[in-house]
Image (cartoon, rainbow, N blue to C red):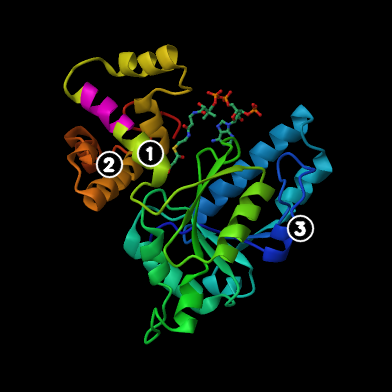
Amino acid sequence: MVAVRVLLYIVDEDKVHAGTTDCNACPAKVPVLLYDTSKDQVAKGLALMDKLLDKDAKKGALQSADAKEARERVTVVDSLTALRDVGMTVEAVSENLRLKQAIFSELAATLPPSAILATNTSSISVTKIAASTLQPGQSAASEEGKATASRVVGLHFFNPVPVMKLVELIPGLQTSSETLQTARSFALACGKEVTMSKDVPGFVSNALLMPFINEAIMCLEKGIATRDDIDKTLKLGMNHPMGPLQLADFIGLDTCLAIQQTLYQGTADSKYRPSVLLERMVDAQWLGKKNGKGFYDYPSA
Ligand code: 3HC
Protein backbone atom coordinates (compact mmCIF):
# COMPACT_ATOMS: atom_id res chain seq x y z
CA MET A 1 0.00 0.00 0.00
CA VAL A 2 1.21 3.48 -0.84
CA ALA A 3 2.33 5.65 2.08
CA VAL A 4 -0.49 8.13 1.67
CA ARG A 5 -3.49 8.48 3.87
CA VAL A 6 -6.18 5.99 2.99
CA LEU A 7 -9.53 6.27 4.63
CA LEU A 8 -12.40 3.92 3.99
CA TYR A 9 -15.76 3.77 5.65
CA ILE A 10 -17.36 0.42 5.26
CA VAL A 11 -20.99 -0.31 5.75
CA ASP A 12 -23.28 -3.29 5.53
CA GLU A 13 -25.56 -2.94 2.51
CA ASP A 14 -28.57 -4.65 4.12
CA LYS A 15 -28.45 -2.15 6.97
CA VAL A 16 -28.19 0.68 4.44
CA HIS A 17 -31.57 -0.34 3.05
CA ALA A 18 -32.94 -0.66 6.59
CA GLY A 19 -31.53 2.72 7.67
CA THR A 20 -33.63 4.48 10.29
CA THR A 21 -33.73 8.15 11.18
CA ASP A 22 -34.50 8.19 14.87
CA CYS A 23 -31.08 9.33 16.01
CA ASN A 24 -29.82 12.77 14.99
CA ALA A 25 -26.12 12.08 15.10
CA CYS A 26 -26.15 8.62 13.54
CA PRO A 27 -29.30 8.27 11.42
CA ALA A 28 -28.12 5.41 9.21
CA LYS A 29 -27.04 3.28 12.19
CA VAL A 30 -24.80 1.10 10.04
CA PRO A 31 -21.81 -0.78 11.39
CA VAL A 32 -18.62 0.76 10.00
CA LEU A 33 -15.13 -0.59 9.53
CA LEU A 34 -12.54 2.17 9.37
CA TYR A 35 -9.25 1.62 7.58
CA ASP A 36 -6.44 4.14 7.23
CA THR A 37 -2.74 3.59 6.49
CA SER A 38 -1.91 6.31 9.04
CA LYS A 39 -2.42 5.44 12.72
CA ASP A 40 -2.32 9.16 13.53
CA GLN A 41 -5.25 9.85 11.23
CA VAL A 42 -7.23 7.00 12.79
CA ALA A 43 -6.55 8.41 16.26
CA LYS A 44 -7.58 11.91 15.11
CA GLY A 45 -10.77 10.61 13.50
CA LEU A 46 -11.79 8.64 16.59
CA ALA A 47 -11.01 11.59 18.88
CA LEU A 48 -13.21 13.85 16.73
CA MET A 49 -16.07 11.32 16.82
CA ASP A 50 -15.78 11.14 20.63
CA LYS A 51 -15.77 14.93 20.92
CA LEU A 52 -18.78 15.47 18.67
CA LEU A 53 -20.85 12.67 20.21
CA ASP A 54 -19.99 13.91 23.68
CA LYS A 55 -21.00 17.46 22.75
CA ASP A 56 -24.35 16.27 21.34
CA ALA A 57 -24.99 14.16 24.44
CA LYS A 58 -24.20 17.09 26.76
CA LYS A 59 -26.49 19.37 24.73
CA GLY A 60 -29.30 16.80 25.01
CA ALA A 61 -29.42 16.38 21.20
CA LEU A 62 -28.59 12.72 21.72
CA GLN A 63 -29.15 10.20 24.53
CA SER A 64 -25.84 9.13 26.11
CA ALA A 65 -26.69 5.49 25.36
CA ASP A 66 -27.22 6.34 21.65
CA ALA A 67 -23.90 8.19 21.56
CA LYS A 68 -22.16 5.17 23.09
CA GLU A 69 -23.83 2.82 20.60
CA ALA A 70 -22.92 5.08 17.68
CA ARG A 71 -19.27 4.99 18.70
CA GLU A 72 -19.36 1.22 19.19
CA ARG A 73 -20.58 0.75 15.63
CA VAL A 74 -17.18 1.95 14.37
CA THR A 75 -14.41 -0.66 14.32
CA VAL A 76 -10.88 0.11 13.21
CA VAL A 77 -9.25 -2.53 10.99
CA ASP A 78 -5.64 -2.74 9.92
CA SER A 79 -5.81 -4.29 6.46
CA LEU A 80 -7.90 -4.19 3.31
CA THR A 81 -8.51 -7.93 3.58
CA ALA A 82 -10.58 -7.24 6.71
CA LEU A 83 -13.12 -5.67 4.32
CA ARG A 84 -13.81 -8.90 2.47
CA ASP A 85 -17.43 -9.28 3.67
CA VAL A 86 -18.69 -5.71 3.55
CA GLY A 87 -21.61 -4.48 1.45
CA MET A 88 -20.21 -1.07 0.59
CA THR A 89 -17.02 0.99 0.82
CA VAL A 90 -16.54 4.74 0.69
CA GLU A 91 -13.00 5.69 -0.29
CA ALA A 92 -11.80 9.12 0.84
CA VAL A 93 -8.09 9.36 0.04
CA SER A 94 -6.44 12.47 -1.37
CA GLU A 95 -7.24 13.68 -4.91
CA ASN A 96 -4.77 11.44 -6.71
CA LEU A 97 -6.01 9.33 -9.64
CA ARG A 98 -3.21 6.75 -9.49
CA LEU A 99 -3.74 6.18 -5.78
CA LYS A 100 -7.49 5.81 -6.22
CA GLN A 101 -7.00 3.41 -9.14
CA ALA A 102 -4.65 1.23 -7.08
CA ILE A 103 -7.14 1.11 -4.22
CA PHE A 104 -10.14 0.35 -6.42
CA SER A 105 -8.27 -2.43 -8.17
CA GLU A 106 -7.50 -3.99 -4.79
CA LEU A 107 -11.01 -3.45 -3.46
CA ALA A 108 -12.62 -5.04 -6.53
CA ALA A 109 -10.41 -8.09 -6.10
CA THR A 110 -11.11 -8.34 -2.35
CA LEU A 111 -14.77 -7.48 -1.83
CA PRO A 112 -17.78 -9.62 -2.74
CA PRO A 113 -19.08 -9.05 -6.32
CA SER A 114 -22.25 -7.46 -4.93
CA ALA A 115 -20.42 -4.80 -2.88
CA ILE A 116 -20.73 -1.18 -3.92
CA LEU A 117 -17.49 0.78 -4.30
CA ALA A 118 -18.10 4.50 -3.73
CA THR A 119 -15.53 7.24 -4.09
CA ASN A 120 -15.66 10.55 -2.25
CA THR A 121 -13.64 12.18 -5.03
CA SER A 122 -14.13 15.93 -5.44
CA SER A 123 -13.24 16.14 -9.10
CA ILE A 124 -11.68 13.01 -10.60
CA SER A 125 -13.56 11.02 -13.26
CA VAL A 126 -15.66 8.27 -11.68
CA THR A 127 -15.56 6.52 -15.06
CA LYS A 128 -11.74 6.36 -14.91
CA ILE A 129 -11.81 5.07 -11.34
CA ALA A 130 -14.43 2.44 -12.31
CA ALA A 131 -12.27 1.23 -15.21
CA SER A 132 -9.49 0.45 -12.74
CA THR A 133 -11.62 -2.28 -11.15
CA LEU A 134 -11.19 -4.50 -14.21
CA GLN A 135 -8.83 -7.31 -13.30
CA PRO A 136 -5.89 -8.28 -15.56
CA GLY A 137 -7.25 -9.94 -18.70
CA GLN A 138 -10.85 -8.90 -17.97
CA SER A 139 -12.54 -7.17 -20.92
CA ALA A 140 -14.65 -4.08 -20.26
CA ALA A 141 -17.15 -5.46 -22.81
CA SER A 142 -17.56 -8.88 -21.14
CA GLU A 143 -20.52 -9.52 -18.82
CA GLU A 144 -18.09 -9.98 -15.92
CA GLY A 145 -16.24 -6.78 -16.80
CA LYS A 146 -19.44 -4.76 -17.04
CA ALA A 147 -20.64 -6.12 -13.69
CA THR A 148 -17.30 -5.29 -12.04
CA ALA A 149 -17.24 -1.64 -13.11
CA SER A 150 -21.00 -1.12 -12.71
CA ARG A 151 -20.73 -1.06 -8.91
CA VAL A 152 -18.53 2.04 -8.76
CA VAL A 153 -20.19 5.39 -8.01
CA GLY A 154 -19.25 8.91 -6.87
CA LEU A 155 -20.61 9.83 -3.44
CA HIS A 156 -19.27 13.30 -2.68
CA PHE A 157 -19.68 14.45 0.94
CA PHE A 158 -18.90 18.03 1.98
CA ASN A 159 -16.76 19.28 4.82
CA PRO A 160 -17.56 19.27 7.74
CA VAL A 161 -19.51 16.12 6.95
CA PRO A 162 -21.61 16.04 10.15
CA VAL A 163 -22.83 19.59 9.43
CA MET A 164 -23.16 19.91 5.66
CA LYS A 165 -26.46 18.62 4.36
CA LEU A 166 -25.48 17.72 0.81
CA VAL A 167 -24.16 14.61 -0.89
CA GLU A 168 -23.45 14.88 -4.61
CA LEU A 169 -24.09 11.64 -6.48
CA ILE A 170 -22.09 10.98 -9.64
CA PRO A 171 -22.61 8.00 -11.92
CA GLY A 172 -19.71 6.95 -14.13
CA LEU A 173 -20.49 5.71 -17.64
CA GLN A 174 -20.46 2.13 -16.30
CA THR A 175 -22.50 2.68 -13.07
CA SER A 176 -25.66 0.53 -12.91
CA SER A 177 -29.02 1.96 -11.86
CA GLU A 178 -29.03 -0.46 -8.88
CA THR A 179 -25.69 0.92 -7.67
CA LEU A 180 -26.96 4.47 -8.07
CA GLN A 181 -30.15 3.68 -6.18
CA THR A 182 -28.31 2.00 -3.28
CA ALA A 183 -25.84 4.88 -3.03
CA ARG A 184 -28.71 7.36 -2.99
CA SER A 185 -30.52 5.32 -0.27
CA PHE A 186 -27.36 5.29 1.80
CA ALA A 187 -26.93 9.07 1.57
CA LEU A 188 -30.59 9.60 2.49
CA ALA A 189 -30.26 7.16 5.40
CA CYS A 190 -27.31 9.28 6.59
CA GLY A 191 -29.75 12.20 6.80
CA LYS A 192 -28.35 13.99 3.73
CA GLU A 193 -30.01 15.57 0.71
CA VAL A 194 -28.81 14.41 -2.68
CA THR A 195 -28.08 16.15 -5.96
CA MET A 196 -26.91 14.44 -9.14
CA SER A 197 -24.13 15.53 -11.43
CA LYS A 198 -22.76 14.11 -14.65
CA ASP A 199 -19.20 12.82 -14.53
CA VAL A 200 -17.47 15.99 -15.72
CA PRO A 201 -14.30 17.47 -14.12
CA GLY A 202 -15.23 18.88 -10.70
CA PHE A 203 -18.89 17.82 -11.11
CA VAL A 204 -21.36 20.63 -10.41
CA SER A 205 -20.01 21.56 -6.97
CA ASN A 206 -16.35 22.12 -7.71
CA ALA A 207 -16.82 23.34 -11.29
CA LEU A 208 -18.60 26.27 -9.57
CA LEU A 209 -16.70 26.58 -6.29
CA MET A 210 -13.10 26.32 -7.51
CA PRO A 211 -13.15 29.17 -10.06
CA PHE A 212 -14.70 31.30 -7.32
CA ILE A 213 -11.92 30.46 -4.86
CA ASN A 214 -9.29 30.88 -7.58
CA GLU A 215 -10.67 34.29 -8.54
CA ALA A 216 -10.43 35.38 -4.89
CA ILE A 217 -6.79 34.24 -4.78
CA MET A 218 -6.11 36.18 -8.00
CA CYS A 219 -7.70 39.30 -6.44
CA LEU A 220 -5.19 38.96 -3.61
CA GLU A 221 -2.34 38.22 -6.02
CA LYS A 222 -3.11 41.31 -8.08
CA GLY A 223 -3.41 43.48 -4.97
CA ILE A 224 -7.05 44.36 -5.70
CA ALA A 225 -7.90 43.99 -2.01
CA THR A 226 -6.42 42.65 1.20
CA ARG A 227 -7.05 39.14 2.43
CA ASP A 228 -9.37 40.38 5.14
CA ASP A 229 -11.34 42.65 2.82
CA ILE A 230 -11.81 39.89 0.22
CA ASP A 231 -13.21 37.54 2.86
CA LYS A 232 -15.23 40.27 4.57
CA THR A 233 -16.81 41.28 1.24
CA LEU A 234 -18.19 37.80 0.70
CA LYS A 235 -19.14 37.22 4.34
CA LEU A 236 -20.94 40.48 4.95
CA GLY A 237 -21.93 41.34 1.39
CA MET A 238 -23.19 37.93 0.32
CA ASN A 239 -23.83 36.17 3.65
CA HIS A 240 -21.31 33.40 3.01
CA PRO A 241 -20.43 31.63 6.28
CA MET A 242 -16.73 31.89 5.40
CA GLY A 243 -14.82 34.09 2.96
CA PRO A 244 -13.26 32.27 -0.03
CA LEU A 245 -9.68 32.51 1.28
CA GLN A 246 -10.67 31.12 4.66
CA LEU A 247 -12.68 28.42 2.87
CA ALA A 248 -9.64 27.52 0.73
CA ASP A 249 -7.59 27.09 3.93
CA PHE A 250 -10.39 24.99 5.41
CA ILE A 251 -10.58 22.69 2.34
CA GLY A 252 -6.75 22.49 2.11
CA LEU A 253 -4.70 24.42 -0.43
CA ASP A 254 -3.21 21.21 -1.87
CA THR A 255 -6.72 19.85 -2.36
CA CYS A 256 -7.86 23.11 -4.01
CA LEU A 257 -4.86 22.97 -6.33
CA ALA A 258 -5.40 19.29 -7.20
CA ILE A 259 -9.06 19.97 -8.04
CA GLN A 260 -8.17 23.04 -10.11
CA GLN A 261 -5.55 21.05 -12.02
CA THR A 262 -8.14 18.35 -12.77
CA LEU A 263 -10.55 21.03 -14.00
CA TYR A 264 -7.91 22.75 -16.13
CA GLN A 265 -6.46 19.54 -17.60
CA GLY A 266 -9.92 18.02 -18.12
CA THR A 267 -11.38 21.00 -19.97
CA ALA A 268 -8.35 22.85 -21.40
CA ASP A 269 -10.34 25.98 -20.52
CA SER A 270 -8.14 28.85 -19.32
CA LYS A 271 -10.83 29.98 -16.88
CA TYR A 272 -9.79 27.04 -14.69
CA ARG A 273 -6.03 27.77 -14.70
CA PRO A 274 -4.84 27.72 -11.06
CA SER A 275 -3.35 30.99 -9.85
CA VAL A 276 0.43 31.14 -9.50
CA LEU A 277 0.03 32.26 -5.88
CA LEU A 278 -1.90 29.08 -5.04
CA GLU A 279 0.78 26.97 -6.73
CA ARG A 280 3.55 28.75 -4.83
CA MET A 281 1.78 28.39 -1.50
CA VAL A 282 1.47 24.64 -2.05
CA ASP A 283 5.15 24.57 -3.14
CA ALA A 284 5.94 26.17 0.22
CA GLN A 285 3.89 23.46 1.97
CA TRP A 286 1.44 26.08 3.20
CA LEU A 287 -1.56 23.78 3.04
CA GLY A 288 -4.08 25.70 5.13
CA LYS A 289 -5.75 24.84 8.40
CA LYS A 290 -4.54 21.23 8.45
CA ASN A 291 -0.86 22.13 8.87
CA GLY A 292 -1.09 25.52 10.52
CA LYS A 293 -0.31 27.93 7.66
CA GLY A 294 -2.33 29.10 4.69
CA PHE A 295 -3.86 32.47 3.94
CA TYR A 296 -4.30 32.61 7.74
CA ASP A 297 -2.21 31.16 10.59
CA TYR A 298 -3.57 28.34 12.75
CA PRO A 299 -1.24 28.13 15.76
CA SER A 300 -3.01 25.16 17.36
CA ALA A 301 -2.86 22.88 14.26
N1 3HC B 1 -16.84 18.82 12.38
C1 3HC B 1 -18.05 18.63 12.92
N2 3HC B 1 -18.87 19.64 13.33
C2 3HC B 1 -18.40 20.88 13.21
C3 3HC B 1 -17.14 21.17 12.65
C4 3HC B 1 -16.34 20.07 12.23
N3 3HC B 1 -15.14 20.23 11.67
N4 3HC B 1 -16.96 22.50 12.65
C5 3HC B 1 -18.06 23.05 13.18
N5 3HC B 1 -18.94 22.07 13.50
C6 3HC B 1 -20.25 22.23 14.10
C7 3HC B 1 -20.11 22.83 15.48
O1 3HC B 1 -19.87 21.82 16.44
C8 3HC B 1 -21.46 23.50 15.65
O2 3HC B 1 -22.45 22.49 15.97
P1 3HC B 1 -23.63 22.85 17.00
O3 3HC B 1 -24.44 23.93 16.33
O4 3HC B 1 -24.36 21.54 17.11
O5 3HC B 1 -22.96 23.29 18.25
C9 3HC B 1 -21.80 24.01 14.22
O6 3HC B 1 -20.99 23.20 13.33
C10 3HC B 1 -21.47 25.44 14.03
O7 3HC B 1 -20.11 25.61 14.40
P2 3HC B 1 -19.49 26.96 14.99
O8 3HC B 1 -20.56 27.70 15.74
O9 3HC B 1 -18.24 26.62 15.71
O10 3HC B 1 -19.00 27.79 13.74
P3 3HC B 1 -19.76 28.37 12.50
O11 3HC B 1 -21.17 28.76 12.82
O12 3HC B 1 -18.82 29.36 11.93
O13 3HC B 1 -19.86 27.11 11.50
C11 3HC B 1 -19.01 25.96 9.67
C12 3HC B 1 -18.73 26.43 11.08
C13 3HC B 1 -20.19 24.98 9.64
C14 3HC B 1 -17.74 25.23 9.20
C15 3HC B 1 -19.34 27.21 8.76
O14 3HC B 1 -18.32 28.15 8.87
C16 3HC B 1 -19.54 26.85 7.30
O15 3HC B 1 -20.60 26.40 6.91
N6 3HC B 1 -18.50 27.07 6.49
C17 3HC B 1 -18.55 26.74 5.05
C18 3HC B 1 -18.36 25.26 4.89
C19 3HC B 1 -18.33 24.86 3.46
O16 3HC B 1 -18.52 25.65 2.53
N7 3HC B 1 -18.05 23.57 3.24
C20 3HC B 1 -17.89 23.05 1.88
C21 3HC B 1 -16.44 22.94 1.58
S1 3HC B 1 -16.20 22.39 -0.07
C22 3HC B 1 -16.21 20.73 0.06
O17 3HC B 1 -16.31 20.12 1.09
C23 3HC B 1 -16.10 19.98 -1.26
C24 3HC B 1 -14.74 19.46 -1.50
O18 3HC B 1 -14.82 18.69 -2.67
C25 3HC B 1 -13.70 20.55 -1.72
The image quarter containing residue 166 is: top right
Counting labels gives 3
Q: Indicate yes or no whether the magenta region holds residue 217.
A: yes
Residue matched to label 1 = 291
Closer to viewer: mark 3 or mark 2 = 3
Q: Which mark is residue 18?
A: 3
- Give the mark nearer the N terminus: 1 vs 3: 3
Q: Indicate yes or no whether the magenta region holds residue 40.
A: no
Residue 244 location (% of width, % of height): 36, 26
Mark 2, ligand 1, within 8 Å: the answer is no
- Observer-nearest of 152 and 108: 152
Direction bottom: furthest residue:
137
Residue 1, visible in the rendered structure = no
Residue 82, visible in the rendered structure = yes
Callout 3 secondary element? loop
Query: Which amino acid type corresponds to the residue marked 1 in the rendered image?
Result: Asn
In the image, taking residue 5 as reference, residue 79 lies left or right, namely: right
Magenta part, dominant SS: helix
Q: Where 255 sits versus 104, above or below?
A: above
* Residue extent of the magenta highlight: 212-219
Mark 3, ligand 1, within 8 Å: the answer is no
- Observer-nearest of 8 and 137: 137
Residue matched to label 2 = 285
Query: Which amino acid type corresponds to the residue marked 2 in the rendered image?
Result: Gln
Q: Where 117 sits versus 276, above or below?
A: below
- The residue at 44%/23% (across/down) is 242
Question: What is the CA distance from the residue labelled 3 to the residue labelled 2?
Answer: 44 Å
